[in-house]
Image (tube, rainbow, N blue to C red):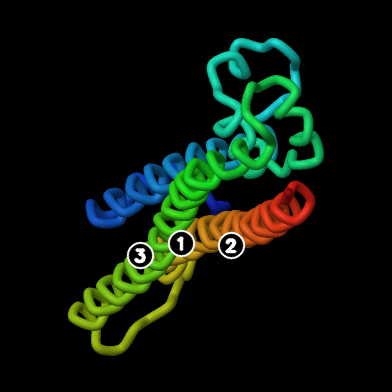
Amino acid sequence: MQGGEIGWDPISLYKVMGLDAKVFGLYLLLVLGFSLSRSVQLGRKLWLFFRDRRGSSHQRNLGAADLLATRALANKLACANDLSEESRETFLEIVDGARSRFDYLWDQSAAKVAVMKNLSILTLILSGLMLSYDVMKIIAISPIPVCGDCSGGPAELLLPFVFGLAVSAVLYAFSSLFAGTLARRRAEWNLFVANANNQHKD
């Protein structure tokens, strides 16, 4: 350490941050926590929702059509042909009954993805507003910005903007991942229904 330089310290930076920056930091934490919990829920529905355990309480509580719809959303259509053996309905009746349930589950998941994508855009806009507000404050105080020790000036100024960009990028990455997965599930479901209709026609 030369000349008494102090390294980057998040605690000391938090103490000198203004109220607006602290509120924005709290917003970032809340949005990130909300999006992570939504991501876990969507991940369970799209990849881990259905574990094929015979006779589980989850299976007993679902009808054959509901079970087929949840399997379709979780990419488990390969083990769907045995549903007619566990139900009094024919396979085509089960598929017809599962259509509305699948549409509901898919629309519900798509709405959650849309909220995450909108939050990422909102976070990006708020990050830009925070930076603009801080720049306006500096210009109002001193028309000629002086950068003597940048560790306490521009670095602190850019901190909320950088964190906002990081959270926005994480939210947009999650929403893009889930949107692509939902699009593939819809295409696989449409193909499955078309094949079922062709194979089980009288």
Residue type beneath disc 3? Leu
The earlier-in-sequence mark between 3 and 1 is 1
Alpha-carbon span between mark 3 and mark 1: 9 Å
Residue placed most toward the observer, 24 or 181: 181
SS state under label 1: helix
- Disc with the residue nearer the chain's start (3 vs 2): 3
Q: Residue at x 78, y 29 (%)?
A: 82
- Give residue 27's position: percent from left, percent from top: 33, 49
Q: How crowded is mark 1: few (under 14 residues within 10 Å), some or many (20 or more)?
A: many
Q: Does residue 148 appear left or right of residue 8 in this picture? A: left
Please name the amino acid that badge 1 sits on. Answer: Lys
Q: Name the residue that disc number 1 marks.
A: 117
Residue 74 coordinates in the image, percent (x, y): 67, 40
* Residue at 30% over, 77% down: 132
Q: Name the residue under label 2.
A: 176
Near-viewer residue (135 or 130): 130
- What label does residue 122 carry, if any? 3
Residue 191 visible to an observer of this rendering: yes
